[in-house]
């Protein structure tokens, strides 16, 4: 158990809908990362937050957005869902981000999103 | 940009066989290198890491050595077990990547009893 929790574990929805995925980081970790794992794209970094502020952006679609709240939990919002958004979405957390010194990221169990 | 290329799978071995999963990288500067493992139905776990050239990361019988001259970080284990069946991801965090992890495509490993 990494100490990172994600809810829900599974989510099934229809095209055009909007969903929210939730992540609670490990106690004491200030930085949260979101990753998408799909069959065709592999594991891709989406976005990073540090202490409530967006820190880095990866291959995140405009239909997707995220935020980190004062209690440090984070939510990833996916809207106007398409079939291709079906994937496993992972959250990870670390103590602080570092441009030079790497801080280990601990991954949650993921949320499996199925868009029908 | 930074990238990771790893051996395509799936790889199927018999128990107690020797394992090598190849990984090469492209990055500017001196990235940190990692192997992550994903067991069926679970999230990613850090298996081992190396943060500078010639470092050897090791854990649970797995080893990988950071080779800057060949830009490689191959994963090895001398005697695999059925419980090692999982997907293995080679990854890097680059100097300028703001801590985002860049993953390889993953290699699915199955061990036959």
Image (cartoon, rainbow, N blue to C red):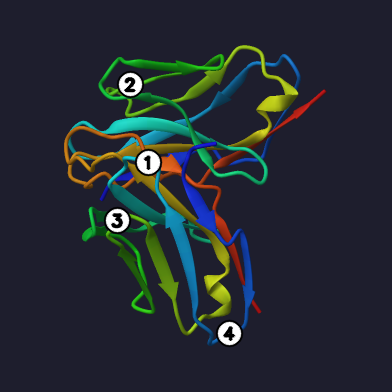
Residue at 32% over, 54% down: A72
In the image, residue B111 sits, relative to residue A44, either above or below, namely above
User: SS of the residue at dot 4?
Assistant: loop
For the residue pair B21 and B52, the one nearer the viewer reads as: B52
From the top left corner, tell me how far across and down residue A17 is, in percent. Answer: 53, 85
Check disc 2 and report its element: helix, strand or loop: loop
Mark 3 belongs to chain: A
Task: Using the rendered image, report if marks 3 and 4 lie on a common chain.
Answer: yes
Going from the N terminus, do you reach mark 1 or mark 4 first?
4
Query: Where residue A27 is drawn, which disc sits there?
Result: 1
Tell me how far mark 1 sits from mark 4, CA to CA. 35 Å
Residue B44 vertical placement versus A84 (above, below): above
Q: Residue at x 40, y 48 (%)?
A: A25
Q: Position of residue A108 (x, y in %)?
A: 50, 47
Taking the image as shown, residue A74 lies to the left or right of residue A36, namely left
Residue A97 image offset from top left, x and y in percent: 23, 43
The residue wearing badge 3 is A48
Q: Residues within 10 Å of mark 1 (few under 14, many from 20)?
A: few
Which residue in the protein does label 2 denote?
B67
Q: Are marks 1 and 3 in contact (CB under 8 Å)?
A: no
Q: Quadrant of the C terminus of chain B?
A: top right
How many residues crowd around disc 3 within 10 Å: few (fewer than 14), some, or many (20 or more)? many
- Closer to the chain start, of discs 1 and 3, is 1
Give the chain letter at badge 2: B
Residue at mark 4: A15
Asked if marks 1 and 2 touch (Cβ < 8 Å), the reply is: no
Viewer-nearest of discs 1 and 2: 1
Q: Chain of mark 1?
A: A
Is disc 4 in the same subunit as disc 2?
Answer: no
User: At 46% across and 45% down in the image, what residue appears?
Assistant: A4
């Amino acid at each position: 158990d990494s100490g990172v929790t994600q809810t829900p574990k599974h989510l099934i929805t229809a095209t055009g809908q909007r969903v929210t995925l939730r992540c609670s980081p490990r106690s004491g970790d200030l930085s949260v990362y979101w990753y998408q794992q799909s069959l065709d794209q592999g594991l891709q970094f989406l976005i990073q937050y540090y202490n409530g502020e967006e820190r880095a952006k990866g291959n995140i679609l405009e239909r997707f957005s995220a935020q980190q709240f004062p209690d440090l939990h984070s939510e990833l919002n996916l809207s106007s869902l398409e079939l291709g958004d079906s994937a496993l979405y992972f959250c990870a957390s670390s103590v602080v981000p570092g441009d030079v010194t790497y801080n280990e990221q601990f991954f949650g169990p993921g949320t499996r999103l199925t868009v029908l | 940009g930074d990238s990771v290329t790893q051996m395509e799978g799936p790889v199927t071995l018999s128990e107690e066989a020797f394992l090598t999963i190849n990984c090469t990288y492209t990055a500017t500067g001196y990235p940190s290198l990692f192997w992550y493992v994903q067991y069926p139905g679970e999230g990613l776990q850090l298996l081992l890491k190396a943060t500078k050239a010639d470092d050897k990361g090791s854990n649970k019988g797995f080893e990988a050595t950071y080779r800057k001259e060949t830009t490689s970080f191959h994963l090895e284990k001398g005697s695999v077990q059925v419980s090692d069946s999982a997907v293995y991801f080679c990854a890097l965090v680059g100097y300028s990547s703001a801590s985002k992890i860049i993953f390889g495509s993953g290699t699915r490993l199955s061990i036959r009893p």
